[in-house]
Amino acid sequence: MKHTVILSDVHLCEPVDSDGVWMRWRQRPYFPSGEFVSLVESILAAMAPGDAGELVFNGDLFDFDAGRVVRGEATFEDLPRTEPVALELLDRILHEHPCFVAALARWLRAGHAITFIAGNHDPQLGFDGVQRRLRERLALEAGSARAGDLVRFRLWFHHTDDGIHIEHGNQYDPYCSFRYPMRPLVPPKRGRDREIAPTVGSITFRLLGSRLGTMNPHFDDSWDMSAAAYVKHWFKHYFSSHHSLAQVWLAGSFGIVYQTWRGRDLGSEDRFERNLDAAAHETGCDPERLARHARLFSPPADEVLHKVIREFYVDRLVLGGLSVGAVLTPLVVRNRKAVGAALGATALMAAYEAALPSRGLDDNYRRIAATARDIAEIYGVRAVVFGHTHVAYSFWEEDTLYANSGTWSPAIIDVERGDVASLEKPIIWIRTDGPHTAGGLYMLDGGALVERRDATSPVPHRRPQVSLVPPPNPAAAVER
């Protein structure tokens, strides 16, 4: 029997030395090293002698966008997305999570494979030096150079030898898609290191999301709030603080638009073909099927800059400012033209909002999930597993399993107390034996794996009502 265990969006990065409200999501007790140790031991205990195993990290295991921690504090920096910087960040992350590394080595010593799939937060896994460093570190920890032969990398997607398609899923999200996932690089410049092309999502995380220290950028409900909720949050956490929510948002939003405009890349047919050739070489898939697959991608958001401008309210900020100015003008210049301009500006703002409604996150999640059926039809696989959306689910349609491996990032719902929505950690566990396939979504809960058949929707349930104060993490205490 073959056991394929899939998890994603762990977002390992350096922890901060703090136990307060600020940057709680990066505090050591919230990293899942202890849970991962339990997962590895649980799966190994469930496997019969002679069973084969493959552990697949379906993207965003590492968060290279989170930046470094210096003297215990997070540094808000926009580091180059180059191989030398990625190597430094990888070394820092592995150093801070020795129990996680030890559990990976335990899996390798048992003779089972590990596959790392690149996501939108760790496309640097495509660099040869990064792959070599990670493979050597795990082999050293496992105590065998041959253990490194069990470690492999995939830049776009992975097909297991028993017909499971595993892919992060960011290619169907316009804000996080790469034009060429096998070669996600900016056009080369003489005398400079190769650099990953920034997606709008990566830019946003660096300039905005990671700097909102009272929110977890990996948990939608943490920041996807109404205007009234933001005002309440500001009074509660920023009014008497030296941190500025408005400054971060203003600088971040305009910076995102500028960097997106500056980094636009319209691509070429030649680069498209080279991307397919690289994917065929890495996966062994038929080039014609790969071409059909690649046509499912969402074009990067930089192709329609207006979408980015609207997503970050830059357009409404500018129009709102003009409207306010027009409304105030009649107070100074009392004539019919001024009054008409004020009324016209207000009407224009209302018409603009009505004509271009914003699309919510749920629409994006549904679109990504629907793509799985197209992929299953293209390749004829027995299962399609995504990550990226952080929404764990699984369901069967006829003989095909569709699933999402969710996230291991903490769903903090009370930043002051540190309460989280759930302590469960999701995995997709698929078992195959010849033509037979079983499995689906499981939750690691207190060291036990519990199958979840009720989670079938790709859209999350907003604002969980149950709060749990996370207990001390024994493994994290060892890592301190």
Image: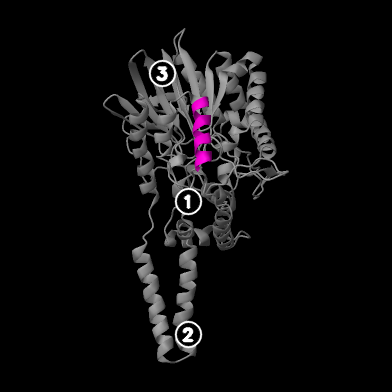
Q: Secondary structure at mark 1?
A: helix
Mark 1 lies on residue: 301
Give the answer, above or below, for where 285 lies relative to 412.
above
The image quarter in which residue 375 lies: top left
Mark 3 lies on residue: 162
Residue 108: percent from left, percent from top: 57, 17
Q: How dense is the environment of label 1, judged by Cα within 10 Å: few (below 14), some, or many (20 and up)?
A: many
User: What residue appears at the point 67 percent right and 30 percent down from the top-left corner?
Assistant: 129
Q: Secondary structure at mark 2?
A: helix
The image quarter in which residue 128 lies: top right
User: What residue appears at the point 39 percent right and 57 percent down from the top-left corner?
Assistant: 358
Mark 2 lies on residue: 329
Q: Are marks 1 and 2 in contact (CB under 8 Å)?
A: no
Q: Nearer the viewer, mark 2 or mark 3?
A: 3
Q: Nearer the viewer, mark 1 or mark 2?
A: 1
User: What residue appears at the point 39 percent right and 18 percent down from the top-left corner?
Assistant: 431
Q: Which amino acid, mark 1?
A: Ala
- For marks 1 and 2, the one nearer the N-term is 1
Q: CA distance from mark 3 to mark 1?
A: 35 Å
Residue 342: percent from left, percent from top: 42, 81
Left or right of 340: which side holds 247?
right
Quadrant (top left, top right, bottom left, bottom right) of the N terminus: top left
Q: Which residues are magenta?
A: 269-281
Give the answer, above or below, for where 339 lies relative to 94.
below
Instruction: Return the residue found at the far bottom.
Output: 335
Residue 15: percent from left, percent from top: 63, 39
Left or right of 300: which side holds 364?
left
Instruction: Return the residue found at the far front.
Output: 270
Q: Which amino acid, mark 2?
A: Thr
- For marks 3 and 1, the one nearer the N-term is 3
Left or right of 230: which side holds 26?
right
